[in-house]
Amino acid sequence: MTMTPQEPFVDIHCHLLPGLDDGPATFDAALSMAERAVSEGIRTIVATPHQLGSHRHNTGAVVQETASRLQAALDQRGVPLRVLPGGEMRIEPDLIQSLRAGQTLTLANRRRHVLIELPTDVYLPLDRLLSDLHASGLVAILAHPERNRGLQRSPELLRPLVRHGCLLQITAGSLVGHLGDHARQLAEKLVQQGLVHFVATDAHDTHNRPPAFQEAFRRVGELAGQETALEICCHNPASVAAGGDVVVGVRQIATKRTNLTFRLFQTFFSETMVRWPIKQKHSVEPFLRM
Ligand SMILES: [Fe+2]
């Protein structure tokens, strides 16, 4: 069954910029990735080269300049794709300071959402970082928790994180089995439990880790319904790209069994209250004032 959205995908995690990390090595390779992304229905990519860790050379200025050059090349070729600057950040003690200094970038450079990544093998407690980001008017998006071995062993750690205000992004390839059974199983479980706020490609090339979205969108629809698929593949990522709010918390998934109760409940409460019991309340002002 083919199920495509009525609106474009927005990819908030993609290693599209050439020559900065383990993404494409050349502009031509990046343009091929961009064309593949467009063929998948993606119209906006927040380019997220690795930052901090062993990629401290990817400063905010370098990322913005490279994104602008790539956008110009895309425009010249008539490729209908918007590229925005961002970053995928290693968790380091100076993460917040680096954001304030412009050494690293928030997603789409909107000073709102920060894409953070854990080491692959272990889970590091995130409560302190989440609180510090919150105090600075920023919201953390945890990249691909389903691929972290510590979280694969202890997935129960994720629900408290989400309740603490962390947003979760799973990788499209995980959902369709391209990144192993453990990642697929956890990704599916998280979608069904309403703990996922974004699907993104985390693409690096056109072959091994391409910017593929359609199959994952269809899989989310099977697992949690079309409305959820649109929310986490289109609407929420579009809000991040625009610097808008994404409501935090656990999403209520309306399964067939609960559908009648869910619909009755919706009659009495606003859609936002039912689907997202916890609303994001902080302001961006503290960060902007620095
Ligand atoms: Fe990544």
Image (cartoon, rainbow, N blue to C red):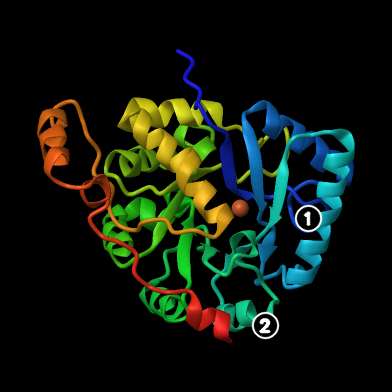
Locate residue 83 relative to residue 183 in the image: left or right.
Answer: right
**10 Å crowding of disc 2: few (<14), some (14-19), many (20+):** few
Locate residue 26 relative to residue 108 in the image: left or right.
Answer: right
Quadrant of the image occupied by residue 91: bottom right
Q: Report the residue marked by disc 1.
A: 67
Determine the residue positioned at 52% across, 64% down.
Answer: 113
Determine the residue positioned at 43% across, 35% down.
Answer: 230
**As shown in the figure, which amino acid type bears the numbered disc 2?**
Ala
Q: Report the Cα–Cα distance between label 2 and label 1.
A: 19 Å
Residue 226, image x and y in percent?
A: 37, 28
Quadrant of the image occupied by residue 149: bottom left
Q: Earlier in the sequence, mark 2 or mark 1?
A: 1
- Give the structural element (helix, strand or loop) at label 2: helix
| Residues at marks 2 and 1 touching, judged by CB atoms closer than 8 Å | no
Residue 88, image x and y in percent?
A: 61, 61
Determine the residue positioned at 58% across, 42% down.
Answer: 10
Q: Quadrant of the C terminus?
A: bottom right
Q: Report the residue marked by disc 2.
A: 101
In this view, the residue in front, 229 or 279, is: 279
In this view, the residue in front, 250 or 155, is: 250
Residue 218, image x and y in percent?
A: 45, 25
Asked if residue 210 can be seen in this view, the reply is: yes
**As shown in the figure, which amino acid type bears the numbered disc 1?**
Ala
Asked if residue 59 can be seen in this view, the reply is: no
In this view, the residue in front, 196 or 208, is: 196
Residue 57, image x and y in percent?
A: 78, 71
Quadrant of the image occupied by residue 1: top left
**10 Å crowding of disc 1: few (<14), some (14-19), many (20+):** many
Mark 1 C-beta closer than 8 Å to ligand 1:
no
Residue 215 in the image: above or below residue 29: above
Residue 33 in the image: above or below residue 168: above
- Give the structural element (helix, strand or loop) at label 1: helix
